[in-house]
Amino acid sequence: MRTNLELAVIGNCQVAGLIDSLGRLVWGCLPRLDGDPVFCALLDPSGGDAERGVFAVDLLNAEASEQTYQRNTAVVLTRLRDCAGNELQITDFCPRFRRHGRIFRPMMFVRLIEPLHGRPRVRLRLVPAERYGFQPARMATGSNHLRFDADTPYRATTDAPMTAIVDQRPFVLDAPLAVILGPDETLTESPLGFARNLLHRTTEYWQGWVRTLAVPVDWTQAVIRAAITLKLCTYEDTGAVVAALTTSIPEAPDTERNWDYRYCWLRDSFFVVRALNRLGATRTMEGYLRYISNLAELSPAQLLQPVYAISGDAHLEEQEATSLAGYRGMGPVRIGNHAFSQRQHDVYGSIILAATQLFFDERLVAPGDIAVFQRLESFGEQATRLYDQPDAGPWELRGSEATHTLSAVMCWCACDRLARIAQRLRLGDSAARWIGHATTLRQRILSSAWNESRGAFVSHFSGTAVDASALLLPQLGFVSPSDPRFLSTLKMIETELRVGDLLFRYRVPDDFGPPKNAFTTCSFWYVNALAAVGRRDEARVIFEQLLARRNSLGLLSEHIDPQSGEQWGNYPQTYSMVGIISSAVRLSRPWEEVL
């Protein structure tokens, strides 16, 4: 079977896994989201059939498969049927529910395997790897469990026949069974009963969480799936938000645009926080701001990197895992990300934008106060100092720097929002000071980022090329959507970057040549821009087309091939899932029209 991104996501904000359409666990890191991928078959050319990095439930002579999420949960159901009509169901999830006054979210994958029709014959292949696929994990067999040695040891406890698992010997599935892969601890009860109890409580948790969301009336299920997926991309222990759950899925075939996205980009995290805030899920914002606060305490002179480890570690030295061939054999597989060493000045605006709701949302238990405001001011000072200095920009160019328009605008956002916060706190002198800074920055940006001959806001000061980030200018409040300069920029972007319902982020060659695939979230930026300028009907049509590009589980990766429609890039991409929420909220009818 050819490897693709038709993958379901399970998780619990501690660990996450990707399940392919045949019910194989092909990606999953332990002990946390950025750990060693003990299930790494996704990055092996065999697509999961290799004797390492996979947990497969093989139905012999399988003929058909069907996969779906249990409604409003992160629980995945995979049905397999063989050529004789025998059928089984695999239920996959990571436990998450409230217990003892806190959220129980162990390092654990749970698999329930049940016969539905006939006498299906199955083979269980549980072959985790270690050291990025370098070798199969070292295993010891117990009476009803397998113990795997690692820096963080783990075990699989089951009521399946141990010999069948160890020898990968087929057997008749004549009764339900469970496999609990988690901490190296003795399970004192029936694996099947334990798993069913975890399933019941996890289902209750997710359905209860969904009931708290303020979802739009249109595209409700798409928004719910996007919201759950964004939640699964958070690391609750620290509050970090990862850009994606994978590393090194190429942006396009054979381009070496393979990056590790299992880290916390401050820019991406702001968009995730804002999307969930719009649905009323504010706890992610509160956790993320705790993460930011810890970074600030450890950052010299309030200078921030664009990306950090989910633990808060600053050093993400990039290296290659030569033991893995890569997605469809398209290496390299990278660990770490060189972007940690770049200058990206938009980070200061990203942090302040993410924190602004703290000062205006009366629902929050711990709203923002003067002390929080004063900590944010130090980031604003950096924004005023750096807004017109060269950086790598939002697209993280590795071979050049320039004064990027979006970076400068995000620095303006820092000053503008600090002024609003100061007014809210009735700090008149501070408000006046930040209004002054915002005015100065805005005048300079308008004069330097606008190219009169091109009739557009260009990607960097005194440049000529446009990029899709200019679509965010009205959304950030920098210009009005009716501003003739923005309308002219929108027209230029449509001419140069649009291909059908998709948009490229830019067209000029970069360090790796011209981009080959469209950047998914830019298409949602375009939808929002159309709605903002009054082209609402057109925006709804394009939004529907974009939703049709999701895989069968309702998920999106980072890039889409405009010709084939195939998804590429790391998966699931939070930027892309944010786009579903932001566009649906903007375009939906009000509930009053329906009820």
Image: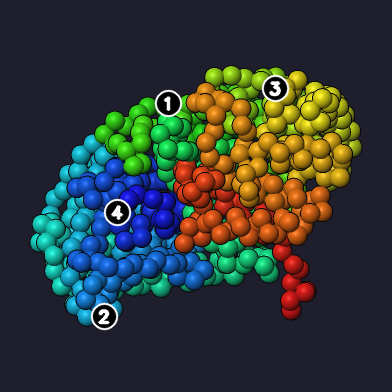
The answer to whether mark 2 and mark 4 are in CB contact below 8 A is no
Secondary structure category for the residue under label 2? strand
Mark 3 vs 1, N-terminal side: 1
Residue at mark 3 to residue at mark 1: CA–CA distance:
25 Å
Pick the residue in front: 431 or 444.
444
Residue at mark 3 to residue at mark 2: CA–CA distance:
63 Å
Task: Kindly identify the residue that appears in the image at 82 percent across and 41 percent down.
Answer: 487
Residue 78 visible (yes or no): yes
Q: Is residue 274 left or right of residue 39?
A: right
Binning the other alpha carbons within 10 Å of mark 1 as few (below 14), some (14 to 19) or many (20 upward) gives few
Q: Quadrant of the N terminus?
A: bottom left
Q: Position of residue 559 (x, y in %)?
A: 52, 43
Q: Nearer the viewer, mark 3 or mark 2?
A: 2
The answer to whether mark 3 and mark 1 are in CB contact below 8 A is no
Residue type, label 2: His
Pick the residue in front: 474 or 307.
474
Residue at mark 2 to residue at mark 1: CA–CA distance:
51 Å
Q: Position of residue 499 (x, y in %)?
A: 62, 44
Pick the residue in front: 546 or 443.
546
Q: Nearer the viewer, mark 2 or mark 1?
A: 2
Residue at mark 2 to residue at mark 4: CA–CA distance:
25 Å
Circle 1 sits on which residue? Answer: 317
Task: Kindly identify the residue that appears in the image at 65 percent across and 42 percent down.
Answer: 498
Circle 3 sits on which residue? Answer: 403
Task: Kindly identify the residue that appears in the image at 69 percent across and 47 percent down.
Answer: 526
**Which disc, if any, is residue 251?**
none
Specify the quadrant of the image occupied by residue 537.
bottom right
Circle 2 sits on which residue? Answer: 117
Secondary structure category for the residue under label 1? loop
Q: Nearer the viewer, mark 2 or mark 4?
A: 4
Task: Kindly identify the residue that appears in the image at 20 percent across and 73 percent down.
Answer: 120
Circle 4 sits on which residue? Answer: 1
